[in-house]
Amino acid sequence: MHISVSKRKIIIHMIILLLIILFFYTAISKLSDIDEFRRQLSNQALPGWSVGILLWLIPITEIVVSLLLVAGPTRTVGLYGSALLMLIFTGYMGLVLMNVFDRVPCSCGGVLRNMSFAFHFIFNAFFLLLSLSAIKLQKKPDAV
């Protein structure tokens, strides 16, 4: 399927905008109620020692990825970062849904709190596919 350069640019920019909104919103949501985020992390199937590290690492990484996506020269790195984050989050959720862990932890905060764990998995997989699609579209000549 052939997509014109201008349509490809619009699609890439729309995906990037969605990713920036997603990562910036989730980071701010976590940081605005850090105690709740700590409780959520503590309820995950993660080693206890990792909670303090992830409490700051996850939202800071989401903000960094958002900022990388904003600027043209760092956009490709941001897209790869976005894909990696979504792969990690989606992979973890997939393991939970396959009953690799002994329980299904609570869902995330913000608007995502109202999603079931299975729907949240689909939501994450969708954003993973968007990230990968933008990377593929951007690799074509004259994309951005």
Image (cartoon, helix red, strand yellow):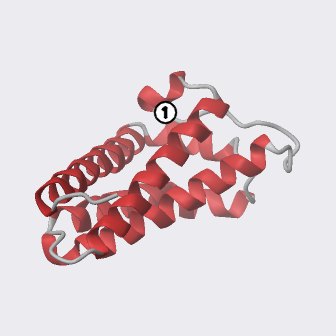
Residue type marked 1: Gly
Q: In this rendered view, identify the residue nearer to me: 1 or 86.
A: 1
Rendering coords of residue 68 (x, y %): 25, 68
Q: Residues within 10 Å of mark 1 (few under 14, many from 20)?
A: some
Q: In this rendered view, identify the residue nearer to me: 83 or 51.
A: 83
Q: Quadrant of residue 77?
A: bottom left
Q: Residue at x 68, y 53 (%)?
A: 92
Please tell me whether residue 117 is drawn above or below residue 18 in the rendered image: above
Quadrant of the frame with the C terminus: bottom left
Q: In this rendered view, identify the residue nearer to me: 68 or 139.
A: 139
Camera sees residue 72: yes
Q: Residue at x 76, y 51 (%)?
A: 95
Residue to which mark 1 is pinned: 109
Camera sees residue 57: no
Rendering coords of residue 42 (x, y %): 67, 46
Q: Quadrant of residue 121?
A: top right
